[in-house]
Every structure is written in C-alpha cells, then in structure tokens.
Amino acid sequence: MFSGINYLSNDIQQRSYNADHSIKKISSTGNAIKQAAYSGGGGGTVSFAARLNNSAISKRNSINAFQNTITFLQAQADGLRQAEKIYQRMQTLAQKALDPMLGISDRELITDEFNDLLNQSAELRGSKFNNTALFDDLAAST
C-alpha cells in the first residue's frame, strides 16, 4: 500500500517539475540566455547565447550613439546656417552705415536692427541640444 502512495508521490513530483520547467521555458521566450539554459544545451549553449546577446546590445548602443551624434551635428549645422544669415545681415547693415548721406533716423534704425542681430547671435551661441551646448563658448566668442 505504501509503495503505491510512494510511487504516486514521486510521479506527482516529477510531473510538477516537468510542468514547472515547461512554464519557465515558455516564459523565457524572448530571452535567449534563459531559453538556452532551460533547453538543456549545457553551459556552452548558455555562453554562446550570452555572447550573442551582449553583442546585440553593444551594436544597439553603438547605433543609438551614432544616431545621437548625427542629430547633434544636424542641429549644429542648422545653428551655423542661422548664424551665417545673421552675420550676412550684419555685414549688409555695416556697409549701409558707411554711407555719409544717411540721416540720423536711418542710422538709428540700422543701429537698432544691428543690436537685435547681436542679441540673436548671443542667444544662438547659448543654444543647447539635450543639455549639451551646440557651440563651444571659446569658439563662439571670437
């Protein structure tokens, strides 16, 4: 009688272990390392899966870094284009200011616009992208 109960107990324990193993294997879908561990491939399989996973993570991080760099450079290029427009307009105003026939009111308008452009260039110099300055202060001040 006890041998039958012992057999049933061992059978239930084995089936419980198998069910638990199957559940863990199914729940690890998408995680190559855990899946390799539960498939019974041994340490080599787990090591190989871990290397592949680490390589994929490294490549993904590199791609993200490249994308961030490209976006930063695009933002910097846009800022330089704006700066070029500002400085070209400042040059035009400076040339107009050289005209000796210019009246006081016209000179005041030129001075006001020139000062506005100076303020715009100062704001542009302080531009940031993801809390990183687009332009180096030393380069922007010269």
Image: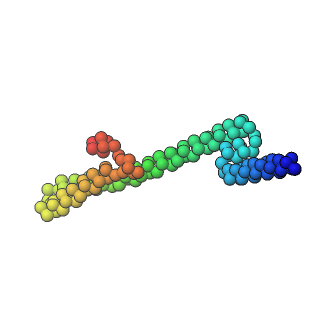
Instruction: Looking at the picture, tell me which residue is in the foreground, 4 or 137.
Output: 4
Against 114, is 38 above or below?
above
x and y, in percent, of residue 114 in the image: 22, 56
Q: Residue at x 44, y 49 (%)?
A: 72
x and y, in percent, of residue 130 in the image: 41, 51
Against 126, is 43 above or below?
above
Outermost bottom residue: 105
Instruction: Looking at the picture, tell me which residue is in the foreground, 87 or 32.
Output: 32
Question: Does 92 sit left or right of 64 as displayed?
Answer: left
Q: Residue at x 30, y 43 (%)?
A: 137
Outermost front residue: 1
Q: Residue at x 68, y 41 (%)?
A: 49
Against 38, is 100 above or below?
below
Q: Residue at x 68, y 37 (%)?
A: 47
Instruction: Looking at the picture, tell me which residue is in the foreground, 16 or 73.
Output: 16
Q: Quadrant of residue 41?
A: top right
Residue 71 visible in the shown view: yes
Display coloring = rainbow
x and y, in percent, of residue 74 in the image: 44, 51
- How many numbered discs sit on the rendered protein? 0
Question: Does 82 sit left or right of 65 as displayed?
Answer: left
Outermost left residue: 104
Residue 92 visible in the shown view: no
x and y, in percent, of residue 142 in the image: 27, 42
Against 112, is 43 above or below?
above
Question: Does 88 sit left or right of 2 as displayed?
Answer: left
Instruction: Looking at the picture, tell me which residue is in the foreground, 104 or 137.
Output: 137
